[in-house]
Image (cartoon, helix red, strand yellow):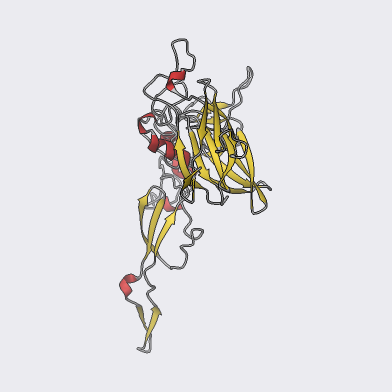
Amino acid sequence: MAGITGTVGTTGKTVDQLTVKEMVENGIHPVEKILHVDLNEASYNQVQKVEGLTLIDPQTLAVLNDNDFGVASIIVNPDGTFTLNYQPEPIQLGIIETTGNGLDASDRDAKINIRQWPVKGLYLPDAIASYKVGGKTFLVTANEGDAREYDAFEEAVRIGDDDKVTLDPEAFPNGAVLKNDANLGRLNITTTMGKSAAGLYTELFVFGGRSFSIWNSSGKLAYDSGDLLERITSEAYPSNFNASNDNNTFDNRSDDKGPEPEGVVIGKVLGKPYAFIGLERIGGVAVFDVSDPAAPKFIEYVNNRNFDIEPETEDEQGNPAAGDLGPEGLLFISNDASPNGRPLLVVGNEISGTTTIYQIKSTRSGRDR
């Protein structure tokens, strides 16, 4: 007999019997799967068969179960009697808010493309602040991410650099596609983690989380903003999305650290704690109500920057005429310590050399504070 019908190459196996490595070796490139949401963990676990699903928006998933059109399964027994084997379950619609952990990974795709990729972010916070809720201390970090670079050592490398990055074909069966500049090819990763003994990358670790996080005093993660900061800035400035603090170029920082959360300070306004997150590259401050450490609420995003003006002067210095560039330090002044009796936020900007003072307005009993 010449061979077994349906087997692949010399493996003696059918396609469904092959390992990922054997598939790649035989020129078969399986589609890579990424888990977006576990329905059990999302509490949609009271049904037997999940049937339909659709996206309501990028962060909201609708799922529906199958009730077999309400018709029960009937088994005919040998003695001629009938047994109802299954009672159709009622239709249960589930609306699930998914956690956003995506990023725009390329500065060469000419679009805003915030999505999940097979990479992991190293938090590497640049700033940290603490506050208390119910007598418990929580820590807030701005997860900027920085690479080490010395004369004899350079940590960052682009995924698409074929001389320095070889992807493990079993871990990344679609590695050639990922290395495309419009996908992950331009994204910077660390060379110090994720490699096997053979020197193949089995995991990809990028710098920073492009997020802010809240931790309890034992270091356990209570919340991470995921891709929320990138989504907020993309909606506020779609034409200058992920621009840097020295240019107005669309998508410029997508292959690096996105908006780059740099600073964080906590301040209380009318008894509520708020986190003020400074974004070093595109600029501005994102404000969140952090009364519930596990579920902060986005309040607003402000950016005192004029994208119609070049951020650099002819001698390559920060241009104050463009507004605030590169927020570095943030200081909250409570109304008790404020010279005008109202809470203030002071932001120092590294590139433009400017300092902006925001007066925080809130309402209690119809009166502005």
Horizontal and vertical percent position of residue 126: 60, 32
* Viewer-side residue, 107 vs 10: 107
Q: Is 51 above or below relative to 207?
A: below
**What residue is at 47 percent from the left and 19 percent from the top?**
320
Horizontal and vertical percent position of residue 286: 49, 38
Picture mark count:
0
Question: Residue 124: in sight, yes or no?
Answer: no
User: In screen coordinates, is 320 left or right of 69?
Assistant: right
* Viewer-side residue, 308 vs 356: 356
Question: Residue 139: in sight, yes or no?
Answer: yes
**What residue is at 54 percent from the left and 29 percent from the top?**
347
Q: Is 219 above or below relative to 240?
A: below
Name the image quarter holding residue 86: bottom left
**What residue is at 36 percent from the left and 67 percent from the top?**
66
Horizontal and vertical percent position of residue 129: 63, 39
**What residue is at 50 percent from the left and 31 percent from the top?**
257
Horizontal and vertical percent position of residue 328: 56, 28
User: In screen coordinates, is 354 left or right of 85?
Assistant: right
